[in-house]
Amino acid sequence: MSDTALNAPWATADRQRVATQFGMWAFLATETLFFGAIFLFYAVARWSHPAGFLAGAREADAWFGSANTIVLLTSSLTMAIAERGVRAGLVALARAMYALTIALGLCFLTIKGFEYAKDISEHLIPGRRFPLAETGASAFWAFYWTVTVVHAIHLTIGLGIVARMLLIPRDRLAARWTTAEGTALYWHLVDVVWVFLYPLLYLAGR
Amino acid sequence: MGDAPEAGLLGREPGERNYLTAGTTVRSWLLTTDHKRIALLYAAGITFFFFLGGAAATLMRAELVTPAGDLLTADEYNRTFTLHGVIMVWFFLVPSIPTTLGNFLLPLMIGANEVAYPKLNLFSWYLWLAGGLLTLFALLAGGVDTGWTFYTPFSTLYSNSHVLLAAAGVFVAGFSSIATGINFIATLHLLRARGMTWMRLPLFAWAMYATSLVMVLATPVLAMALLLLFAERAFGLPIFDPRAGGDPVLFQHLFWFYSHPAVYIMILPAMGVVSEVIACEARRRVFGYEFMVYAMLMIAIIGFMVWGHHMFISGQSPFASLVFSALSFVIAVPSAIKVFNWTGTLYRGQIRFSTPMLYALGFVGLFTLGGLTGLFLASLPLDVHLTDTYFVTAHFHYIMVGGSVSAFFAGLHFWWPKITGRLYSETLGRFAAVSMFFGFNFTFFPQFVLGYLGMPRRYHEYPPEFQAWHVMSSTGAVVLAFAYLWPLCYLGWSLVKGERASDNPHDATGLEWQTRSPPPTDNFAEPPIVTGPPYRYHEEGYAPHAPAAADEPQRP
Amino acid sequence: MIQASTLAPRVDGIFWMLTGLSVAIMLLVGLLILIFSFRYRRGSKAKRGPVPEKLSGEIEIGWTVATLFVFVFVFWFAAALDTEQFEIPKDAMEIHVVAKQWMWKLEHPNGAREINALHVPVGVPVKLVMTSQDVIHSFFVPAFRTKQDVLPGRYVQAWFQASKVGTYHLFCTEYCGTDHSRMIGGIIVQSPADYARWSSGQPQGDSLADQGAGLFVAMGCTGCHGGSAVVRAPSLAGLYGRAVPVGDGRFVTADEGYLRDSILLPQKDIVAGYAPVMPSYQGVASEDDVVKLVAYLKSGKVK
């Protein structure tokens, strides 16, 4: 793979690939602990006030959640195709798939926006106008808002990283396959987090 | 390992240019990806924060000379000790040795010409700087009064100070810590020179490895804890608020899950520095090298399981307290092993009492006392009496200041000729080392007594019977302040007028000494090959790093 | 330092034992460093040469095991005392403590109230039932070697038995804001006769339980929990200390914490078979009121 674009201090494509993957996996380990801490909050809140917490969870709209799960899993597929495309030198296909991934990501954020609008119209923000009286219900919604916003920020960063792949000139894209691998790993992480969030947020109250 | 530097760099003539003279514009510094320059960027920031935090400490010690709160108001005092804690922990102690000495030395010690991700390295400096500026801004805007621990619900619901800004600053700096950790781990796994097997790594490199593991696995939990704090304080989301059924103690669990391992982030690098210095200045292989390595790894791992010993009186389950107490005693074992091994290293040595050696020997003494008082705090009924008193303050200052800061100064002096290419005055340096040791004990030993007598921490005013001990402590602080300021003078002088250093002034065996002082931008004219274990000091006629191609390099 | 409780000498026993151990280890390490530093200073004529590999390995294992053994012993020694302290004596005199920024409010069972001071008789076990109105505080009496964080939204307990007449410091040791260092008071330990005299000299209000009975009516609790109520609510007579079945098949012991939660967070654990109709008294009943109501519910005077 003499045409691989090399960054300092790597001398060969193999080593650079190992380095990219190593760094990305190490980062994923930190993300596990990052989300682990908020999952601990979920567990503690649910354990201390089971009835109220689930009463809160019942208000979450599973239609939005399910639609978003489908959108995001599809985007993982397009991302996987894009990454393989880069490695196989199919530049046009890869670029199309990157564009599709971005479109699906934006679609996710749009659906999330509509969901937020609905939640706000129902005053599902803990505070004085919060409609649920049960202790624990507001804790669910505190979790909901914090974790979905954190996830959305991760997704937005992901959109930036994918957009960067599109900015690479066509003739140099194939040489940047180690970058493509790193990008795909990050995007899949954002998806995996959502796979955990979906049942916790939308199926808990059902 | 196929990690030879690119061909273009190999052919360059060594001699004229080093990393300091490679570019002189501001831009060449601010956009550098050279790990050695980034180390100096960090050093500049850390020096600033150290003296800022030190100034706050001086103000507190001045206030505490009299029992009445006459120098500062209660709010001012609370903001001062919070400033001291936040700055010293996150903007001095946690980054101090890893980002300066670690950044500078780690690639050199393993025979690499860079860290694994040079751009990420620069990015983490900017993150750290951004975090520091946010926190500074919080302080200028009026300060924070929560203590560095940010306990809820005080921090989320009751404090009338700039908690959000300060928490945001620490949050951002946390990501810098994570990035540095990932960088170091990858560097150690992927960039070791030919023949540099794991068991040939210098102990400083091992210390960086253990530290990085803790940074990478503990810091994210702090980040989330601060984020939850942020959500509750800024948006009123009920998370820790007991009135809405939340649990304020949950914050303490999350906080200490980071902050106890963070103590090891602060002390492990110090252990690495001291091992290097003692081995070199005693001309002796480190006693029980393998045990030293395993001890550091044990400390890093068990360090994750003892956070609950900060919470014996918090109302957590008494059975949990028993387990945490037992594990806290267990983690004292590897620390004790290290102390014995440092002592053993001196046996049959050729000891030279240079400045770094004096700092390092001071470290061993202070760390031992700090560690032993840790046993007091690990004992359940005794901790109930001593926690949140000056005993705890004294205990962690013995570890953090007596330990880490002494080691930082040891390392600074030891590698000064390599970093700057100049020598400093040994006489003045020894004087600073000795006055730091005495000033430190003078300041903090009385605080053990204060704590046992029941003087609580974070008190702006106190009953008059404690005054004598406070006056003693404050007097010692004057000596200590001098001992910290003094090196600024002679090291500053050395920068300008110091005698030129040779490449290996200590006659040490580490790879970092096998290149020029200061090192060239790409570190080594030729990639080094390692043929033996580190610290081969006491065998006559041994040439530490003679190239021997026959030695089969080992892949990581 | 003064030892004014039955616990204090035992805690000090561990303290001095550990101090002795620490001095011994400091002496060992310090002397070895000094001796080696002198004997093996550069250029001295002492014998050098490598330490045999086998010997150094044995030394290493030896001191690891020895350290571990000593530490485990210290842990066991300290933990044994701690587990003895788990059990709060049944006959203990009960004091309710409500902490707030920045004062201690203490209430005796007979209704006597004190601020930043507590009178107790010597030789009688005293149980503290504590809660905070705002942030976390900590109840610390150095002379008793007693300390316990006082949490908002929860009852925490601690106990001590004073052994010496005198006045001792009460400190708040969990940082709690501006006047943290002024949140101090005194524990006045008196002989039983003096205490009785002090106690009878207090303005004789109603006992906590009687005040609670008044509140029980005034706050409208009888409307549902009274004998002839229309709304279906469980009777509270003899409730304290019983195991109560709650909705999902669990049983909860009706201790102070449960009674408190049922007043302030009534949705938390609803007695099986009842509808969740009780409103929260959060913001209606103050911590002091809750203390009285709980005292009433515990008193056995509930009909």
Image: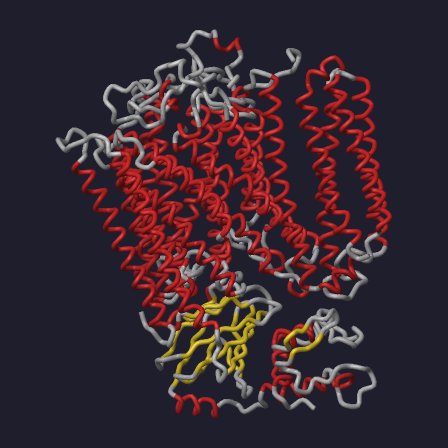
For residue C231, side relative to residue C293 (left or right) = right
* Percent coordinates x, y for residue B540 in the rendering: 23, 22
- Between B1 and C17, the one lying in front of the other is B1
* Percent coordinates x, y for residue A158 in the rendering: 72, 33
Rendered position, B276 above or below B515: below
* Percent coordinates x, y for residue C294 in the rendering: 63, 81
Rendered position, B183 above or below B462: above
Mark yes or no: residue B268 visible: yes
- Between B207 and C3, the one lying in front of the other is B207
Number of dots carrying numbers: 0
Query: In the image, what residue occupies the spot 53% across and 48% down?
Result: B258
Q: Quadrant of residue B418?
A: top left
Mark yes or no: residue B62 visible: no
Rendered position, B461 above or below C49: below
Q: Quadrant of residue C264?
A: bottom right
- Between B169 and C26, the one lying in front of the other is C26
Rendered position, C128 above or below A94: below
Query: In the image, what residue occupies the spot 65% across and 46% down?
Result: A35
* Percent coordinates x, y for residue B235 in the rendering: 70, 53
For residue B472, side relative to residue B75 (left or right) = left
For residue B313, side relative to residue C67 (left or right) = right
Query: In the image, what residue occupies the spot 44% across and 81% down?
Result: C125
Query: In the image, what residue occupies the spot 77% across and 25% down?
Result: A82
Q: Residue furthest left?
A: C45
